[in-house]
Image (tube, rainbow, N blue to C red):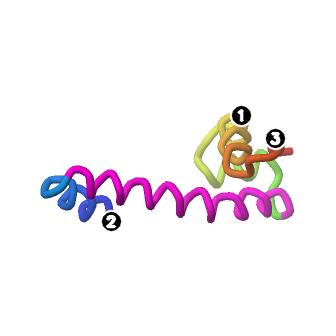
Amino acid sequence: MEEEIDKLTKTSPIAGVRAARHLAVIAERVGYWAARDTPTDLDAAQAATHLSLNEDAARKLLSRYDRWSTYR
């Protein structure tokens, strides 16, 4: 997908921006429910391991997608 967007950007920079924005909107929508449901499956340490992040970074990422509370 990245290569296709790069090709698109070379022919039309604004089309590349539109594609990137669309991906961000999709990530936000999908990320919201995924972040909300993650605490039922994993604790913070496990989530961090699965995301290849330290616990603090994982909490911040999940909280950003969750848009409500800090990951527990």
Q: Secondary structure at mark 3?
A: loop
Within 10 Å of disc 3 (Cα), the crowding (few <14, some 14-19, many 20+) is few
**Magenta region includes residue 28:** yes
Q: Are marks 3 and 2 in contact (CB under 8 Å)?
A: no
- Mark 2, residue position: 1
Q: Amino acid at mark 3?
A: Thr
Alpha carbons under labels 3 and 2: distance apart: 31 Å
Where is mark 1, residue-wise?
A: 56
Residues at discs 2 and 1 in contact (Cβ within 8 Å): no
Question: Alpha-carbon neighbours of circle 1 within 10 Å: few (<14), some, or many (≥20)?
Answer: few
Q: Quadrant of the C terminus?
A: top right
Tell me how far mark 2 sits from mark 1, CA to CA: 29 Å
Up the image or down, 59 lies above or below 10; here it is above
Which mark is in front, 2 or 1?
2
Residue 71 among magenta residues: no
Residue drawn at the location 73% of the way across and 44% of the way down = 63
Nearer the observer, 46 or 3: 3
Q: Of the residues under marks 3 and 1, which one precedes in the sequence?
A: 1
Q: Amino acid at mark 1?
A: Asp
Q: Which residues are magenta?
A: 13-40
Front residue (pair 71, 45): 71
Helix, strand or loop for disc 2: loop
